[in-house]
Image: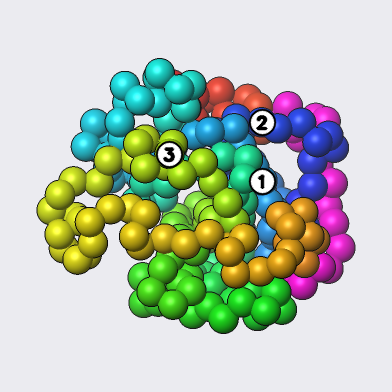
Amino acid sequence: MKYIALPTTEVHPLSFYLAMEEYVARYVSESDCFFMWQVEPTVIYGRNQVVENEVNLDYCREHGIKVIRRKSGGGCVYADMDNLMLSYITTGENVGFAFNQFVQMILLVLRKAGVKATGTSHNDIMIGDHKICGTACYHLNGRSIVHSTMLYDTNMEHMLQAITPGPEKLEKKGIQSVRQRITLLKDHTSLTLEELKVLIRDTLCQGELMLTPDEVEKIEQMNTKNYVD
């Protein structure tokens, strides 16, 4: 699997990386591609969700947290520079196979980090009864795009205040708050976030494909057209 790299270390808006996934799926011929990214505080919600029901928009505006809709389904996620976003693009449209491939890859990395984790039937990754990593997927041009948020660390206040799951959802899950159903990877490993990124890349990828400045410009154009309101 090839690692898809950018020519600079600039931190882009979350919507750019969604466009980058789409660009790779459409125009990069490698059968399996992977990249990691981090963003300034952003809430990303699923294509079928009603944003007013899932996101505390007033809190996000007050604290400068961006809000973006993605093309995949699934739930609402808060991301910032202390956690890690993962993107996997593979040939084929079998969603179950793509999910399983991705989950098994991440479980392998976590085992190497000394973390006992398991996958669920909902394609989440758990440490005990607590969620560490959620995934979502969609199809494009004969390819599957799987993306995931790995909770290494995060601004817990922002996460708890920016995402507002309804009481029915909490009651159904048998929990009282978002905090009760997640855990942070930093509490289960001695690896720093940068060391974890190196481990992920060394474990999963063989070789690198560096995008050109022209390709980055095409991604920017795709971002403006399809992801920026």
**Which badge, 1 or 3, is on the more N-terminal residue?**
1
Judge by depth and name the residue closer to the eye, 219 or 194.
194
Q: Where is residue 67 drawn, in percent x and y?
A: 42, 30
Quarter of the image where one finds residue 129: bottom left
Asked whether the beta carbons under mark 1 and mark 3 sit within 8 Å of each other, the answer is no
The quarter of the picture where the C terminus appears is top left
Asked whether the beta carbons under mark 1 and mark 2 sit within 8 Å of each other, the answer is yes
Which residue is painted at 83% across and 34% down in the image? 8
Give the residues in magenta.
200-218
Q: Where is residue 6 drawn, in percent x and y?
A: 79, 41
Cα separation, mark 1 vs mark 2, equals: 9 Å
Residue named by callout 2? 12
Number of the front mark, 3 or 2: 3
The label number, if any, that marks residue 157 in the structure image: 3
Circle 1 crowding by C-alpha within 10 Å: few under 14, some 14–19, many from 20: some
Residue named by callout 1? 37
Q: Where is residue 135 drawn, in percent x and y?
A: 46, 60
Circle 3 crowding by C-alpha within 10 Å: few under 14, some 14–19, many from 20: few
Q: Would you say residue 101 is visible in this rendering?
A: no
Q: Amino acid at mark 1?
A: Trp
For residue 72, above or below residue 188: above
Q: Is residue 205 magenta?
A: yes
